[in-house]
Amino acid sequence: MTDNSVPYTRIDVCNRSLETVRHSRNLGMEVLSAEESGVRVRMPWREDLVGNPDTGVLHGGAIFAMMDQAGGMANSCRLYPNFEITPTIDFRVDHLHAPTPGKAVICQASCYRLTTHVTFVRLTTWEEGMEDGEPVATGLATYTRMKLDKNGRVTS
Amino acid sequence: MNNSLKALIEACRAGEADYQDLIDRVPYARFLGIELRVQGEELTFILPRNPENIGNPTLPALHGGAVAGFMEQAAIIFILLEMGEPRVPKTIDFTIDYLRAGLFRDTFAECRITRLGRRIANVHISAWQKRRDEPITIARAHFLLSEENN
């Protein structure tokens, strides 16, 4: 649903967070779509993100970092138009199979439950072009909600 | 298994090569800027304070993903160096608890192998900044120990 009284969209919020989070920018992440039900992001294959130089497979840590960021943006999409900081409480990622070297990865993250203090997020990552097939990784995470006042200070 | 990696691991274990050469062989480890300090037989991994790894610019705080990647890579290097035969482990799963904010300062990590099976290793990783007994994150991961030809 679109609320025309809010001067920014969910995708604006997500892009803004990518602009400010230097490490995620360094990963080359981009937002493909942002809805209340979830966000879809892309991370390119890049030589400097490789974990095993013999195979050229992306490092699990790079995939993790991308998914953690995607989860945070899924929270922002669910909380929109309000803005909160949502630090990660815990995060589990299962690496189902290795993505093909040279292929970008796509992550879909959804906040499926929002409580007063906690958000619950599930995430799926595929190789680009294989979004209808077997995921390369799945994730499950919780985040805590830190509400901000008009000056951007944490209130709770 | 790449023979140059195997030779490098053996040289590290024999004290004939710098452990840092092993870390620098992994592009993502260089991307994060991971370092390794050896004291006696203890390995301490270091993620030096680096603005490239910042997540929250206002605090400023480290990106949780950078800390997680650091810990995962620390565990991989730890397994390579601790095992009798060098085999490249593949991450099966990685689970992390964030206990404190990662401040914009050096981060340290140590690993403990909880169980080293024939095919699967269970590793506990702890990361801290100020004091070892005040971890900022703890993680648990399972690794598949590849066969020689993988």
Image (cartoon, rainbow, N blue to C red):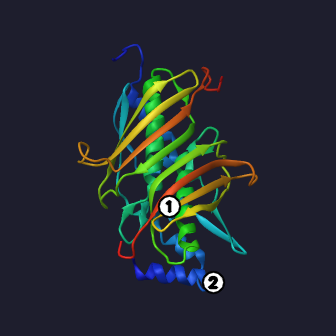
Residue B30 seen in the figure: yes
Q: Which of marks 1 and 2 is nearer the N terminus?
A: 2
- Vertical side of A24 occupied by B84: above or below: below
Q: What element carries label 1?
A: helix
Tell me which amino acid carries mark 1.
Phe
Q: Which chain carries label 2?
A: B
Residue furthest to the top in view is A5
Q: How many labels does the image show?
A: 2
Judging by the rendered image, the residue that carries numbered circle 1 is: B31
Residue B70 point in image, percent of width and height: 56, 57
| Circle nearer the viewer, 1 or 2 | 2
Where residue A133 sits in the image (x, y, percent)?
Answer: 24, 46
Q: Residues within 10 Å of mark 1 (few under 14, many from 20)?
A: some
Q: Which residue is drawn at 60% across and 20% down?
A: A150
Residue on which the image places disc 2: B15
Task: Tell me residue A15's x, y (percent).
Answer: 42, 36
Tell me the tag on residue B4.
Answer: none
Label pair 1/2, CB-CB below 8 angstroms: no
Is the residue A55 above or below the residue A77 in the image? below
Q: Quadrant of the C terminus of chain A?
A: top right
**Marks 1 and 2 share the same chain:** yes
Which image quadrant is residue A109 in? top left
Which residue: 73% across, 75% down? Answer: B40
Height in image: A150 above or below A60?
above
- The residue lying toward the viewer, choosing from B80 and B61, is B80
Quadrant placement of the N terminus of chain A? top left
Question: Which one is in front, A117 or A148?
Answer: A117
